Image (cartoon, rainbow, N blue to C red):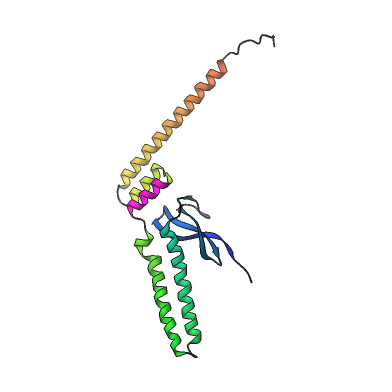
């Protein structure tokens, strides 16, 4: 028998589409999430794998991770048992009727916007928790319609100007330090060396 175990992310929630979401890393056995190992703000712009910042355990993400997988597994098992025993036991059809609501519950949990999407306040709170940049805050403000596209562009241009000014100041400081060091004369060695 092959045993598949490891860790992966489950319980995707508090999503800001195209930017970030919250997910919990679980230790899994046969891809069934068992042991929560920590929650992360995961950035959606990563091409391969995932990149995120730990935020401690998110109860909502943890619960959704278990609930999504649990409803699918339980609903599928009940329906398969009902189908397998239907000829021998006409009452087995009741198991199928029990499995259908579980699969419907999965659909609700998986696709209900209130469970899936982050509110503006929650998105700002997540940005505060991870110490996000002003650019990330601008993208969230733009996504939720708190600022216009032209206001976002102005913010980005201001941030670029500030970064350029800071870089120029650092270069000037290093140049001055180099010039001071190049023209500094060391006192003569008393031993004549």
Residue 184 vs residue 190, the one in the foreground = 190
In which quarter of the view is residue 109 placed? bottom left
> Is 71 placed above or below 47 here?
below
Residue at 35% of width from left, 43% of height from top?
Answer: 153
| Above or below for 159 versus 31 | above
Stretch of the chain drawn in magenta: 119-129
Is residue 83 placed above or below 67 in the rendered structure?
Answer: below
Where is 42 relative to 106, above or below?
above
- Quadrant containing the N terminus in the rendered view: bottom right
Q: Position of residue 84 (x, y in %)?
A: 51, 85
The residue lying toward the viewer, choosing from 160 and 37, is 37
Q: Residue at x 41, y 74 (%)?
A: 102
Which of 130/145 is in front? 130
Q: Find residue 32 and report its horizontal and vertical position in percent.
A: 52, 66
Which quadrant holds residue 192?
A: top right
At x 43%, y 81%, the residue is 96
Q: Residue at x 36, y 56 (%)?
A: 118
106 in magenta: no
Which of the image's four quarters has the C terminus? top right
Q: Position of residue 132 (x, y in %)?
A: 41, 44
Lateral position of residue 35 relative to residue 165, left or right: right
Q: Position of residue 163 (x, y in %)?
A: 42, 35
What main secondary structure does the magenta stretch of the protein show? helix
Q: State the count of labels.
A: 0
Q: Left or right: where does residue 8 sit relative to residue 61?
A: right
């Amino acid at each position: 028998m092959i045993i598949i175990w490891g860790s992966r992310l489950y319980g995707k929630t508090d999503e800001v589409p195209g930017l970030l979401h919250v997910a919990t890393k679980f230790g899994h056995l046969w891809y069934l999430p068992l042991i929560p190992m920590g929650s992360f703000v995961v950035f959606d712009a990563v091409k391969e794998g995932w990149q995120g910042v730990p935020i401690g355990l998110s109860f909502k993400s943890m619960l959704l991770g278990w609930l999504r997988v649990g409803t699918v597994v339980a609903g599928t098992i009940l329906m398969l048992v009902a189908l397998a025993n239907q000829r021998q036991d006409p009452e087995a059809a009741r198991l199928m009727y029990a499995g259908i609501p579980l699969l419907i519950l999965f659909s609700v949990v998986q696709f209900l916007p209130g469970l899936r999407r982050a509110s503006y306040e929650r998105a700002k709170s997540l940005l505060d928790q991870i110490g996000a940049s002003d650019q990330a805050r601008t993208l969230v403000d733009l996504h939720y319609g708190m600022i216009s596209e032209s206001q976002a562009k102005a913010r980005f241009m201001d941030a670029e100007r500030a970064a350029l000014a800071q870089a120029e100041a650092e270069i000037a400081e290093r140049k001055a330090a180099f010039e001071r060091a190049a023209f500094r004369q060391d006192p003569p060695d008393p031993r004549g060396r």
